[in-house]
Image (cartoon, helix red, strand yellow):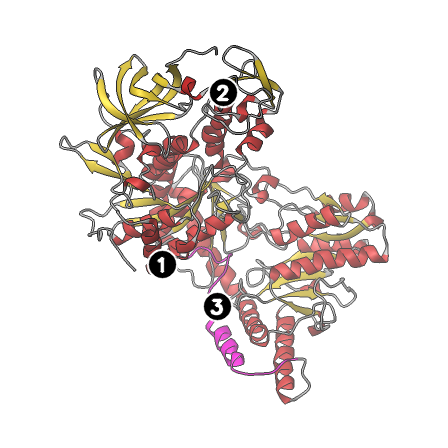
Amino acid sequence: MTETHREPGRARRPLRVLAAMSGGVDSAVAAARAAEAGHEVTGVHLALSANPQSFRTGARGCCTLEDSRDARRAADVIGIPFYVWDLAERFRADVVDDFVAEYRAGRTPNPCLRCNEKIKFAALLDKALALGFDAVCTGHYATVRRGADGERELHRSADQDKDQSYVLGVLDQRQLAHAMFPLGDTRATKAEIRAEAQRRGLAVARKPDSHDICFIADGDTRGFLAGRLGSAEGEIVDEDGRVVGTHQGAHGFTIGQRRGLRLGHPAPDGKPRYVLDISPVDNRVTVGPAESLDVVALTGIRPRWCGRTPTGPGAYTAQLRAHGGETPVTAELAGEELRVRFASPVRGVAPGQAIVLYDGSRVVGSATIAATERRTAHVA
Amino acid sequence: MPYFDHAATTPMLPEAIAAMTEQLARTGNASALHGSGRRARRAVEEARESLAGALGALPSEVVFTAGGTEADNLAVKGLYWARRDADPRRTRVLASPVEHHAVLDAVQWLADHEGATVDWLPVDRYGRVHPDALRAAVERGPDEVALVTVMWANNEIGTVQPVAELAAVAAEYGIPMHADAVQAVGQLPVDFGACPLAAVTVSGHKIGGPYGIGALLLGREWSPTPVLHGGGQEREIRSGTLDVPAVTAFAVAAELAVARRERFAREIGALRDELIAAVLAAVPDAVLGGDPDPAGRLPGNAHFAFPGCEGDSLLLLLDAQGIECSTGSACTAGVAQPSHVLLAAGADRELARGTLRFSLGHTSVKEDVAALAEAIGPAVRRARAAGLT
């Protein structure tokens, strides 16, 4: 058994910590580390579904009764109090309904960011603070440091491969001041985190990782959306407006998508075609060649800043997807909008997704992508 | 440590622990014919006699089960099946809507799977069924009624039902009535022979006995269809090898609980009144649930709604100080559901979210109440700040 994570020392000042425990291995180890550091930790599992499934199916979800029991067992082993809080109503209103509405509008949302912003570090944090807790602890891989000016800085985790700072890019100074990510400092591999869980006697050590969207238990996002948005046949057109196929609902598509288009007519040049644009108003999907996906600039709305709001244009690196790479940009606030220009074109940028700006390893802020500017203009 | 959850389970009496551990060291299936079997059988029959004696029943009216839930299921389903088999018109079940889930869900299951029609009996704002309401429900078609089931006293808000009067109404029509007396034994006089009930559920771990043991007191004229089939033990109504240590300890606990009942009701009732006064003094807008007349509620029960609070928040805040209580309603995976008892009694849905039940028992002392009196005010203020999510 190898342990490469830094041995957590005793906390300088013990805090009253509320640990969000999904029933998975990361949040269990995070809670255990917080307790070991001398904090007074209470575990809470969030019940996010009004009608939870009994058992996990495969690697999806964290909202089954089995997950709740796993979290409870982990809390028992760590030796901390444990409760289940019913946030199903808030989650439905703030995350699930928003997810559906975004797809209805032709955008591709990231519900994990939304959940962090509205549930874990809002509804949960607010309730925790009101009840006398000092911080909310989660199993995210990210680091909060105090900067030179005393401000809380959010940084990528020590291990870049597991970094989850992207989905935390919506947190502001106040939220960061009450956030605790005990796994962020670790350079341990997932196998080592599992070994640590094993060493701590946590039965979740061998539990599979969660993937996909937790509230879509069977992983069928398209089916989930069709059930809520209905299905209506629409046209697939090329950049010249020629009809090249049909589909059963524009919400089944994401910009940059290649598979599942089932186009009747081959492209003139024989090259693969990608979804370029989704227009929910006329239920139309536009396809075209890969080059037409090249985006040179974008406009973001609802900007959120981890620290002070930047003034004037700045050079940053940007991340556009949960597991995406970094790309250099210049960004500037224009009123309520964030204007971003890429140093070189990027592909597959979908409105609704978040752009997170970094300065080195430090998260500067984020915005929701509202519109993109393509290198090659196409008919939308 | 202030433990206010005796209605969920109460510490085992030392006498019951002694009786149980003594039996645990012995071998013998009570149905076996040899010496060990006879010794086990003797222990069971002596326990049956003492339990029957404590509860005003005949020994032959005691059917041991693996707890209150099983006894409730046996009474509700078994009586329904037997009565319907004897006359297919009998498909109506008359039940109070404030029953424990062991009765409530068994009744609902009959409606969902066995063609039963359920008449949920009207209750007043304390959750009490009035005999006239039962009579009116029976009168809508007495020949179609399979059974009546109304609990002796409510587990959440402590309301005592007029069981004797209700049983008299049912008996007038020759309809069997079942009463779940799990919360009543040791707190109220429970005399099976004194009122014309067909069946009464009792449980071990609520009265200082072990978990996993209970009994259905069952009039000799009633033969419910079994839920568990097998070796034909317990009048061929409840098969399964008898749990001799649990049966023995259960009887010891029942005897003591009944013998100590009057003193318990007087002393714990006074402590409960003190608790209610202390909570209302600390939180003047707290709403006492159930009957404010001490004679109309279980001596060990206090139940409150705290406006603007989440019951879960209050529970956490008190638990953190070692004060243990319950929100009072059933949980699904740890999430408290809106109480069907309060809703049936006409409570406001918002108010029903902020409830706590404090149930006292044989280990409760003045210091427990003093600790709660000190903690409840600040806890409510804090929970209010956290609000309703």
Look at the image and say whether residue A299 sits in the magenta stretch.
Answer: no
- Whole-Å distance between the Cαs marked 1 and 2? 44 Å
Segment colored magenta: B1-30
- Whole-Å distance between the Cαs marked 3 and 1? 36 Å
Same chain for the residues under marks 3 and 2 in the image: no
Does residue B274 appear in this view?
no
Q: Chain of mark 3?
A: B
Same chain for the residues under marks 1 and 2 in the image: yes
Does residue B313 appear in this view?
yes
Q: Say what amino acid the circle numbered 2 marks.
A: Gly
Look at the image and say whether residue B10 sits in the magenta stretch.
Answer: yes
Per the image, the residue denoted by label 3 is B12
Lateral position of residue B294 relative to residue B80, left or right: left
Instruction: Give above or below for B175 relative to A104.
Output: below
Q: What SS does tag 2 mark?
A: loop
**Quadrant housing residue A117:** top left
Pointer 1 with pointer 2, Cβ within 8 A: no
Q: Chain of mark 2?
A: A
For the stretch drawn in magenta, what is the main secondary structure?
loop
Q: State the image coordinates of residue B180 (x, y, percent, origin top left).
A: 64, 57
**Earlier residue among tags 1 and 2:** 2
Lateral position of residue B11 relative to residue B136, left or right: left
Same chain for the residues under marks 3 and 1 in the image: no
Q: Nearer the viewer, mark 3 or mark 2?
A: 2
Per the image, the residue denoted by label 1 is A198
Which residue is outermost to the front? A269
Q: Nearer the viewer, mark 3 or mark 1?
A: 1
Per the image, the residue denoted by label 2 is A106
- Whole-Å distance between the Cαs marked 3 and 2? 63 Å
Q: State the image coordinates of residue A229 (x, y, percent, origin top left).
A: 58, 24
